[in-house]
Image (cartoon, grey):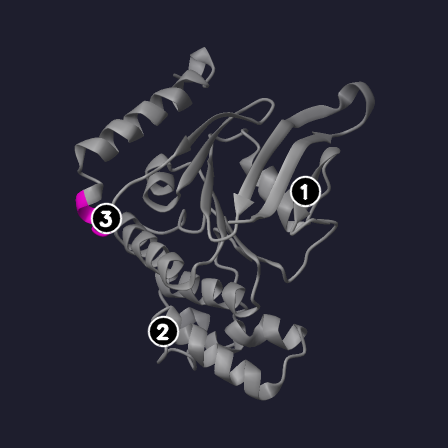
């Protein structure tokens, strides 16, 4: 598949002069069309900063970020983002939230209606369109947020620890949902998470980030049978891979935190 997103030698510093703090150091990776990639790291590893740079919410101090060969210079509809905290507009219904980005794109009313209905069905909430966010569970709200991001036809879906605020049972069901959605739609996705198990369950490629400054220190291609995630979580191969990468993460922690 062609490379869709390219992050090349990206550095990011905050502050100026002697007080400047380097938070990202020479971060490079490619995301191909249809690929699901994860960045995993502890607090301070810079993974959220990488996501902000790709989203166009900030600019790198050096290096380049391109999407389909075009430099990322700010936010755009070619990148859809789902945040950890529920980001639905509380005064809009579920259907109106899904339609919001398409209205900004000035699509026709018929197109908006059809695509809203389609993506509500894709995320399994076809009957929830008239409900307000306060009437939806946390998992349902995140499904609506994902539907809203997909409805605008982004080239890349950016997932900023999207299930971190959910309890474990709902989080596991949402992981299964997201994997099924990826298989169904062929979306291109970048996930950042501190949850190594989540990364292995969802991503075909995992990059491990070290902190202070943030940098990629290990990359792993993940080839697992994800048809039954409940069984996969207990399989010897999965547990061995998770422990192997967990040791890599632990080795990056300062001695006082181990």
Which is nearer the N-term, disc 1 or disc 3?
Answer: 1
Circle 2 is placed at which residue position?
125
Is 175 one of the magenta-colored residues? Answer: no
Left or right: where does residue 70 sit relative to residue 188?
Answer: right
What residue do we see at 43% from left, 38% from top?
205
Give the residues in magenta.
226-231
N-terminal of the pair, mark 1 or mark 2, is 1
How far apart are labels 1 and 2 at the CA level? 35 Å
Task: In this rendered view, identify the residue nearer to me: 257 or 10.
Answer: 10
Q: Are marks 1 and 2 in contact (CB under 8 Å)?
A: no
Quarter of the image where one finds residue 219: top left
The mark nearer the N terminus, 3 or 2, is 2
Q: Which residue is mark 1?
A: 65
Alpha carbon of mark 1 to alpha carbon of mark 3: how far?
33 Å
Q: Helix or strand or loop: what does disc 3 sit on? A: helix
Task: Please give the residue where the numbered disc 3 appears in the rendered image.
Answer: 229
Q: Is residue 114 left or right of residue 67?
A: left
Where does the image place residue 68, in percent across and percent down from the top left? 65, 52
Of discs 3 and 2, which sits in the foreground? 3
Dividing the picture into quarters, in which one does residue 18 lie? top right
Instruction: Tell me where residue 66 appears, x and y as whole percent.
Output: 68, 46
């Amino acid at each position: 598949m062609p490379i869709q997103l390219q992050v090349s030698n990206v550095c990011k510093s905050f502050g100026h002069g002697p007080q400047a703090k380097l938070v990202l150091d020479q971060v490079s990776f490619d995301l191909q069309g249809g690929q699901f990639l994860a960045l995993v790291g502890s607090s301070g590893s810079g993974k959220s900063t990488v996501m902000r740079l790709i989203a166009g919410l900030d600019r790198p101090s050096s290096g380049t970020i391109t999407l389909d060969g075009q430099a990322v210079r700010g936010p755009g509809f070619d990148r859809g983002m789902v945040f950890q905290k529920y980001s639905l507009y509380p005064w809009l219904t579920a259907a109106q939230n899904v339609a919001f980005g398409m209205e900004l794109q000035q699509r026709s009313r018929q197109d908006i209606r059809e695509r809203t209905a389609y993506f509500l069905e894709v995320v399994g909430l076809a009957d929830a369109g008239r409900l307000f966010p306060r009437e939806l569970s946390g998992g349902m709200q995140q499904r609506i947020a994902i539907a809203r991001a997909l409805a605008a036809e982004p080239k890349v879906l950016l997932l900023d620890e999207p299930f971190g605020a959910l309890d474990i049972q709902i989080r596991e069901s949402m992981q299964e949902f997201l994997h099924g959605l990826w298989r169904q739609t062929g979306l291109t996705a970048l996930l950042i998470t501190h949850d190594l198990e989540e990364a292995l369950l969802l991503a075909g490629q995992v990059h491990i980030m070290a902190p202070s400054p943030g940098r990629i220190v290990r990359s792993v291609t993940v080839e697992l049978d994800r048809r039954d995630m409940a069984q996969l979580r207990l399989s010897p191969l999965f547990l061995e891979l998770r422990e192997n990468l967990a040791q890599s993460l632990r080795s990056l922690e300062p001695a006082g935190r181990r």
